[in-house]
Image: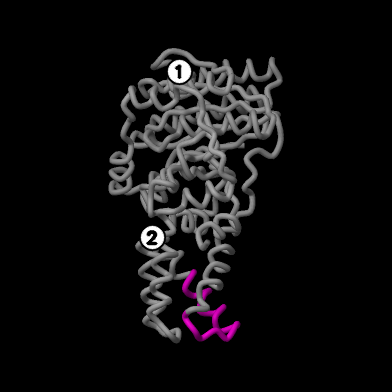
Amino acid sequence: MFKKIFGNNKETVENEEIVEEIEAEEPIEEIIEEVIGEPEIKKESFFQRLSSGLSKTKKGITDKIDNLINNYGEIDDDLFEELEEILIMADVGMKTTMDIIDKLRDRLVEKKIKESKEIKGTLKEVISEILKENNNHELISSTPTVMLVIGVNGVGKTTTIGKIAYKLKFHDKKSVLLAAGDTFRAAANEQLIEWGKRSDINVISQGEGSDAAAVIFDAIQSAKAKKVDVLLCDTAGRLHNKKNLMNELNKIFKIIDREYAEANKEVLLVLDATTGQNAISQAKLFSEVADITGLVLTKLDGTAKGGVILPINHELNIPVKLIGVGEGIEDLQVFNPEKFADALFK
């Protein structure tokens, strides 16, 4: 069931300003250009795409750690202070950084490690364990599933939906239906329809400014009639006007619970990795509006702030389910903590 929260407006003015600054619409020409044409499927392996997609984050974390280790002989407090700074600058966040440092200190004592050159393997272990704290990385647990995708405009939400649809259909062999529930943003319908064409998936839509809940209602009836495995729904991203967003999502949740009670429900929040710590602010605000079951972190390939995945996973207690490590349709990958750590420290 979905959680609805109508009171306790806890967010600060500062957080609302953060979200409003991020929430910029993409130019229509760029949106259409992005989705038209045949997908370019890279021939790289899963690990190669992940590793190359994390190249900027690796430069911001592991390359700097290598330089740090090379400048020290024995481990001392100065080394830990510099390591702390590296992690914080990579958007790992203060709380998660301190937890990592504390665990690393304890682990090094247990292993009786005193030389700086031996730190890296132990640090990788600690980070891998933090990434594995939330183990439910499965995208869908059963069918039929209604998957609501939420997030502010500009994070790549509709593009993410198109890539999820492609993955579900061609990799997971599921039947999929798309619902164009973002009736607020200009060109949102057109963008989703183009993604539907790309994967030969039907899209239920109405005109701009229509009632989003009515679109979801129509989509549910179609999904039930056609016995579709996954109904994948786009939603508006007007978090700066939280009351309107809450009202809209509440109507959608009520319709899903009433019309499709037997379906598994998933709510995925899409976050832009390039915004660093601001992504955490968005996640906290959205968690007051909906019961989020998983996170999608996009644009990891375009930032050195990929370290934000650590506090997102560690502090929010919401599993990261998908990560975007490139623009290609195959570059939205199921999050695997061990492979992520391996790629980061390769």
Question: Which disc is residue 130 wearing?
Answer: none
Mark 2: few/some/many CA within 10 Å (<14, 14-19, 20+)? many
Residue 112 on the magenta span? yes
Above or below for 101 versus 77: above
State the residue in front, 165 or 70: 70
> Seen in the image, is 329 located left or right of residue 186?
right
Q: If you read the primary sequence from the N terminus, does the residue marked by circle 2 or circle 1 appear first?
A: 2
The residue lying at 43 percent from left, 76 percent from top is 69
For the point 46% across and 41% down, which residue is it? 326
Question: Label 2 to label 1, Cα distance in Å?
Answer: 44 Å
Q: Amino acid at mark 1?
A: Asp
Element class at badge 2: helix
Identify the image quadrant of residue 267: top right
The amino acid on which the numbered mark 2 sits, given as a three-letter code, is Gly
The mark closer to the camera, 2 or 1, is: 2
Residue 118 x/y as whole percent: 52, 78
Quadrant position of residue 89 = bottom left
Q: Nearer the viewer, residue 200 or 315?
A: 200
Instruction: Tell me: residue 154, above or below residue 219.
Output: below
Q: Residue furthest front?
A: 43
For image coordinates 45% across by 18% down, the residue present is 211
Reading the image, the residue beneath label 1 is 211
Element at label 1? loop
Which region is colored magenta?
100-116
**Residue 172 percent coordinates (x, y):** 68, 34
Mark 2 highlights which residue? Answer: 60
Is residue 245 located in the magenta-colored stretch of the structure?
Answer: no
Looking at this view, is 146 or 306 the one in front? 306
Residue 238 in the image, given as x and y percentages of width and height:
37, 32
Per the picture, the main secondary structure of the magenta-coloured stretch is helix
